[in-house]
Image: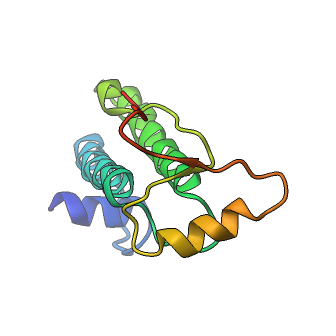
Amino acid sequence: MTPKQARDIMYGWARSGKELTPEQRKMGLLYDLKDEVAIWWHIYEYGSNDPFWPDGCNLNLTRTHIMNDVDELKKLGEDHSDVIPHEVPETLMIPRSKYFDTRYNRFKNQQGQHVVVAGDQETLF
């Protein structure tokens, strides 16, 4: 069984009728963790195109997914807590995103929003 198949079964995307062994569950979680870390870095580098939420919300949501996978892996005896990124401001905007200007103006004009634009001085690590 491949790691992707183990992850699919683990999350119920593919119905096999079989229980996963702890090793298969670990494989699926590691595959999922690798995917989530790649997604986090992609959003951090290029921003997201989500019209309803700033990039910081999407980064923190992905961070939560990473933390859940790390917690599940700890229960199986593996510690990967070194891959958990730091929390970022919810209103963080990455200026390299495709629709940055449109999204920035939308969030900036919402009452009560204080939009933070990531720049050279913005360090997350």
Q: Position of residue 74 (x, y in %)?
A: 38, 27
| Residue 50 in view of the camera | no
**Residue at x-position 52% and y-position 43%:** 64
Coordinates of residue 59 in the picture (x, y in percent): 48, 50
Furthest residue toward left? 2
Query: Is residue 125 something one can see in this rendering?
Result: yes
The front one of 125 and 19 is: 125
Quick check: 5 left or right of 60? left
Question: Which residue is painted at 52% across and 34% down in the image?
Answer: 87
At a point 36% along the width and 56% down the height, the residue shown is 19
Q: Is residue 67 left or right of residue 2?
A: right
* Above or below, 34 relative to 9: above
The image shows residue 30 at horizontal and vertical percentages of 26, 45
- Image quadrant occupied by the C terminus: top left
Most foreground residue, 91 or 4: 91
Give the quarter of the image for residue 71: top left
Q: Quadrant of the N terminus?
A: bottom left
Residue at left offset 83%, top offset 51%: 112
Total tally of numbered discs in the picture: 0
**Vertical position of residue 45 compared to residue 60: above or below:** below
Q: In which quarter of the view is residue 98 placed? A: bottom left
Q: Nearer the viewer, residue 53 or 66?
A: 53
* Residue found at the very far right of the displayed protein: 111
Q: How is the image coloured?
A: rainbow
Q: Which quadrant of the view contains residue 52?
A: bottom right
